[in-house]
Amino acid sequence: MTTKNLENKQIIWFQDNNEYLVVAPLVAETLSLLNKKINKEEIVSKITKQVNIPNKEAFSLVQDIEVLLNTSKKTPGNNQTLLVQKPQVFHSIKYYKINGFYFQVKFASDIETSLVHPKFAHLETEKTNGIDYLFEVFSDYNAISFSIDGLHIGTWNLNEVHFFQGKFSMELVQKIYQRNEDEWIGTFHASAVSDNNNTILFLGDSGNGKSTSLALLQANGFNCLADDFVPIDTSLLAHSFPAAISIKKNSLETLLPIYPELKTSAEYHFKKLNKIVRYLPTNNKNYSLKLPCKALVFIKYQKNSDLIINKISNITAFEQLVPDSWLSPLPENAKLFLDWFEKLPCYQLTYSDNEKMISTVKKIFADDL
């Protein structure tokens, strides 16, 4: 168990299930004592000395806190009990070139192809005999699997297909950067914009405007480092990810005057993910670029809103960031993540005027807010 003081709270990391919990200092102290197998009566005595509550209430509190310690968080997604038979013949075979590596990706059907290929179509290359890695993706009515060079990576329920997509992206990142999974502190459901010196991560719920804001910024002097999937390594640098920017249907009116090519680009309907998107290739062609993170910005487009930019507490930001992130299960990487996060400025940005949003992002990069 690892703890980190942050503002007036404590963040606790449980190694057994790789779970982070934000609690009050008294709860954190009690959890630590329970974890060290200290006698409950001794813990109750400590609590009653710190807090003016009856002994019976203190004992009940310790029991409730003990439940937190013993509750195991289910690991999402990868389900070893599911089995998908690999087909003899694959419906579609694609070739991609990224950072000088050639990937052959075999898809069993149009379903699997639609989950991966659209965001990487701009990287497609001609068939080649010099393949560095072979990915095979296949599914049935219940689950989806994939393997790399014949090694089974995982199987996911089709209702959790986004976990498959995240793992596919993580494996791709490891290959294009030649770094193992233990060399990353985490990957974040965010969009990353850069000024070529630093990057800012945009976060927020789906539909809040992360990708649209990114597309607007890359048309105004900034670069897209990554969209929807931002990997950060143990040197605390955010890495470029080669996927195209996903543009939702309700953003087309805003972006078509800037990117007329979106008018004729293919539209993809992802029923299981409940979204309709088109893909916009990024202006970044350097897929080996890695930059320090300047700030986290929880961004939201809200019609007719004035521009509102407020610094928010890191605890508030932490509680929004972690649920949608993959974080390393290694103790040394968990400590790196907490130390890195503690120092990051965090903002909430709400806007309706695109020019004002762009101007505000420039100020964040320039430390001019």
Image (cartoon, helix red, strand yellow):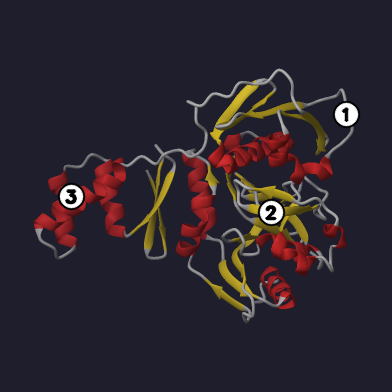
Query: Mark 3 = which residue?
Result: 43
Picture coordinates of residue 249, whole percent (x, y):
71, 60
Contact check, label 2 and label 3, Cβ < 8 Å: no
| Label 2 secondary element | strand
Task: Determine crowd level at label 1: few under 14, some 14-19, many 20+ residues with C-alpha closer than 10 A.
Answer: some
Q: Position of residue 333 (x, y in %)?
A: 52, 43
Front residue of 23 and 76: 76
> Residue 127, labelled with which disc?
1
Amino acid at circle 3: Ile
Reading the image, the residue beneath label 2 is: 276
**In the image, residue 317 lies at what x, y percent?**
50, 62
Q: How many marks?
A: 3
**In whole angstroms, how far apart are the C-alphas of marks 3 and 1?**
66 Å
Q: Secondary structure at mark 1?
A: loop
Q: Is residue 127 above or below residue 195?
A: above
User: Is residue 196 in sight in this rendering?
Assistant: no
